[in-house]
Image (spheres, rainbow, N blue to C red):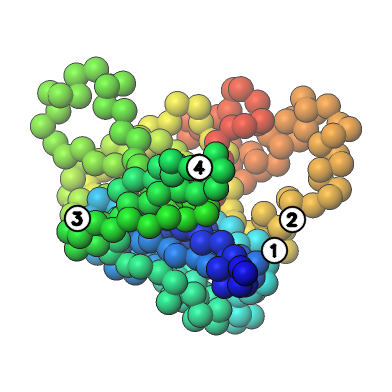
Amino acid sequence: MLTRASMTKRVAVIGAGVSGLSCIKCCLDEDLEPTCFERSDDFGGLWKFTEDSKDRTTRVYRSLVTNVCKEMSCYSDFPFQEDFPNFMSHAKFWDYLQEFSEHFDLLKYIQFKTTVCSVTKCPDFSETGQWDVVTETEGKQNRAVFDAVMVCTGHFLNPHLPLGSFPGVHKFQGQILHSQEYRTPEAFQGKRVLVIGLGNTGGDIAVELSRTAAQVFLSTRTGAWVYSRSSVGGYPRNMMSTRRCNNLIAQVVPSCFLNWIQDRQMNKRFNHENYGLSITKGTVSIRQFIK
């Protein structure tokens, strides 16, 4: 006779970052048996700050501050403490992940310094739906069978560095690096730096380097709207914009009129054209930089 224990489904969770931690908890909520594999020596994924990038793992840079307010970036069943700021440093956010992990006792389900080498279907997959997972810890490989696999490696895992798109780049004698490798500005003291890309990361790094480097150039293909994290009255902007009434307006009002209104609102703070940041393709799907 099958017991409840023998019927428990085993779930492999790859990665112990924000998604991985929540997946462990969700598995426990559903009486599943999770095993999380994390290749580094700690949880938190990119939110765990390190002083260097020797492990080639994407991490936050030292000056990073969240762009999404705490009410919209917390787990639904574990809100931030009231005394936490609306927008917090990476250290504060990692503290929150630690509190979440300890509160729900998640760390005992994580195998640290363990790399997942392969995930393949078992020979009887058509009948069992099971997966064969091979991992490696300190040079030793292990194999285990799981009923499900949850991949929580994040979309920032592998850096995109399209050097082939820059003719003559092989002749450049200076340092070329991806923002994944950036941690602090001290190494760029007195240097001339070109930052390519005006996403939030590119903008943050360019601003920070401007206080250290001899000169900083910021390159962007399409321009961007630059606006503050806080809106009218000091309320978080993303909370003010993510509202039912705004969604209704977007459905009934022509996009050309909405674009015109947004153009006027965005240029009230400063004229983007004066800084080479003007938008020519309309505001829909155009990159925005939050400062």
Which residue position holds label 1? 235
Q: Is residue 177 above or below residue 111?
A: above
Which residue position holds label 4? 125
Tell me: 70 left or right of 111: right
Q: Residue furthest front?
A: 1
Q: x, y (%) of residue 246?
A: 81, 45
Q: x, y (%) of residue 17?
A: 45, 61
Residue 154's label in the rendered image is: none
Q: CA distance from mark 4 to mark 3?
A: 39 Å
Q: Nearer the viewer, mark 4 or mark 3?
A: 4
Q: CA distance from mark 4 to mark 2?
A: 48 Å
Viewer-proximal residue among 13 and 10: 10
Q: Nearer the viewer, mark 2 or mark 3?
A: 3
Q: CA distance from mark 3 to mark 1?
A: 39 Å
Could you tell which of marks 2 and 3 lies nearer the N-terminus?
3
Which residue position holds label 3? 54
Whether pointer 1 and pointer 2 mark residues with C-beta atoms closer than 8 Å, the reply is yes
Q: Amino acid at mark 3?
A: Lys
Q: Nearer the viewer, mark 3 or mark 1?
A: 3
